[in-house]
Image (cartoon, grey):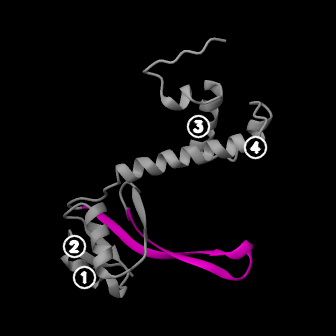
Amino acid sequence: MQKYNNYSTPRIFSTSKLAIRQVLDLTYFWAQQIDYHAFLRRPCKFGSESTIVDWKNFARDLCDERFLRHPVVIGGPGHIVEIDESAWTKRKHNWRRLVSNQWVFGSIYRDTRECFAVLVDQRDCATLLSIIYQYIRAGTTIYSDQWVAYNGIADGPGPHRYNY
């Protein structure tokens, strides 16, 4: 079979050893969040589990790159977003002892369910305000719990109300 390299062909197709149909199948099932390992290994003739895992990682990395280059900005005048923070932890060998703790700050836009989440090292007012200015449009009403670091949000892009 002859290979054609065309400038209009996306790089993922021209550099992959998979058939285009296999790439499309992998991408479709990944986007649908279907656990497809067993399904793809038999009917779609993927002999290797590592091929499926590699493709999932590649698709995730593409999304990471896209969102880092073009961050989601939510809200706007007359719209409401909710903000909150959460600690994500990991157990060593899925056992009792916690080995890491990562704080995540995020927001959700009530109308469209658009959201963002950002890893944060510090949860102080200055750090959170810089994230709010980056991801939330001016004039947006912000709902939060009454956590102490949110006290300075009154200086933020829009009115701040407490949600209990």
Badge 3, how many Cα within 10 Å: few under 14, some, many 20+?
some
Classify 137 as above or below 89. above
Question: Marks 1/4: CA distance?
Answer: 50 Å
Residue receiving disc 1: 152
* CB atoms of marks 4 and 3 within 8 Å: no
Identify residue type, mark 4.
Glu
Highlighted magenta segment, given as a residue range: 79-108
Can you say whether 155 is above or below 70 in the image? below
Q: SS of the residue at dot 1?
A: helix
Q: Is residue 128 left or right of residue 6?
A: left
Callout 3, which amino acid? Thr
Q: Is residue 12 magenta?
A: no
Question: Which residue is disc 4 drawn over?
Answer: 49
Mark 4 lies on a secondary structure that is helix
Q: Residue at x 24, y 60 (%)?
A: 137
Residue 103 is inside the magenta segment: yes
Mark found first going from the N terminus, 4 or 3:
3
**Mark before the other along the chain sequence, 2 or 4:** 4
